[in-house]
Amino acid sequence: MHRSAPRLSRILACAAVPVMLVAVGCSSDSGSDGKKNAGSSPSGSASAKPSEPTVEPAKFSDLPDPCGAIGKKTIEDLVPDAKKKGGTAGQSSDLSARGSCSWNGLDDKGLKGSQYRWLDVGLTRFDSDQALGSGAERATADYTKQITKAKAAEGAQKVAAEATAGIGEEATVVTYGLSKTDEDFEYATVVARTGNVVVTLTYNGAGFAGGKKPSSADMVEGAQKAVKEAIAAVEKTAEATPPAKGEDKGTDKDADKGTEKAGDDGKKDSAGSGDESSPKEKAKATPKS
């Protein structure tokens, strides 16, 4: 009996070893699975992170020649005896983004005096930008800015501003009188927006040597007629120069530049069809009235 007791203890001790090993093995597997599960969570979260929304593409990717944006017949009607019938282009570092043109002339009516007229049109196009907003949003901000600028003309008298329908997506007419060179001038400025392009057109006139001053209504009528033609020219240019296939309008600046360059090359090929060489090629400074 005394010899069997130590032997029984040794048997019980050996029987307990496999149980402990199994327990250790289970614990090890559990820890491995835990690490795998913990590691899978961050990658899942990263893949589910939403991307930033892209801005709306710009509607127009080029501008028309500003000196060709208004018809010759309209120029003859609004600026009789214009010094330069083809207009004088303003300076611009990028004619696909901004451009301007002006006409002025003095119509001598003999004993009835003379009539002076000056017409200027400016076109500004805005690209869509992820940081700055869509082209239409940027153009809307500039539209408001140009109206404020017209109303704040130095020396302007009896300033009035009124929204007008039927010109682009939105338009406002600003009228005022202005005295200079001992003559009374009547001004009408129309600021209009279509898509991501803003058109600012100013028409003014005065009577010289006893000539009667033009009415504000006549100035407004003439300005509205001309700006409608300019808006139509913007839309026609967009139809003639569609974005390149696969191009992301407004969001890919490199692609925009390529399209703009192609549009300019196309205009150069068609230059010279009028009485004078294209003012857009010369890009001379615009005289101020």
Image: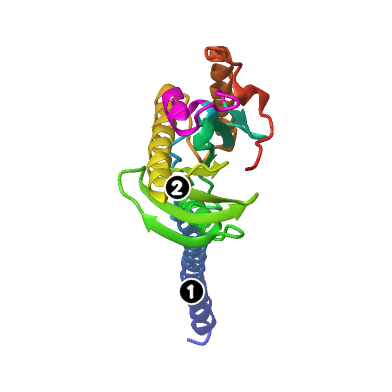
Quadrant of the rendered image containing residue 262: top right
Q: Compared to 23, does 191 lie above or below?
A: above
> Circle 2: is it few (<14), some (14-19), or many (20+) Cα within 10 Å?
many
- Mark 2: which amino acid? Val
Q: Nearer the viewer, residue 56 or 279?
A: 279
Can you give x and y, in whole percent of width and height, for residue 63 in the image?
51, 31
Task: Give residue 61's position: percent from left, percent from top.
Answer: 49, 33
Q: Element type at marker 2?
A: strand
Name the residue at 51% across, 66% down: 31
Residue type at the position of mark 1:
Ala
Q: Which residues are magenta?
A: 68-86
The image shows residue 185 at horizontal and vertical percentages of 54, 49
Count of numbered labels shown in the rendering: 2
Q: Is residue 55 visible?
A: no
Q: Which residue is mark 2?
A: 190
Residue beneath disc 1: 16
Regarding residue 221, the answer to whether it shows in the image is: yes
- Against 284, is 201 above or below? below
Left or right: 271 in relation to 164: right
Hey, which residue is sitting farthest left in the picture?
A: 166
Residue drawn at x 41%, y 39% as measured from the top left: 222
Q: Is residue 80 magenta?
A: yes
Q: In the figure, is residue 23 to the left or right of 288?
A: left
Q: CA distance from mark 1 to mark 2?
A: 98 Å
Q: How is the image coloured?
A: rainbow
Q: Is residue 203 magenta?
A: no
Residue extending furthest bottom? 2
Q: Which mark is residue 145?
A: none
Tell me if residue 250 comes above or below residue 6 in the rendering. Answer: above
Rendered residue at 37%/49% (across/down): 170
Residue 210 percent coordinates (x, y): 54, 43
Mark toward the viewer: 1 or 2: 2
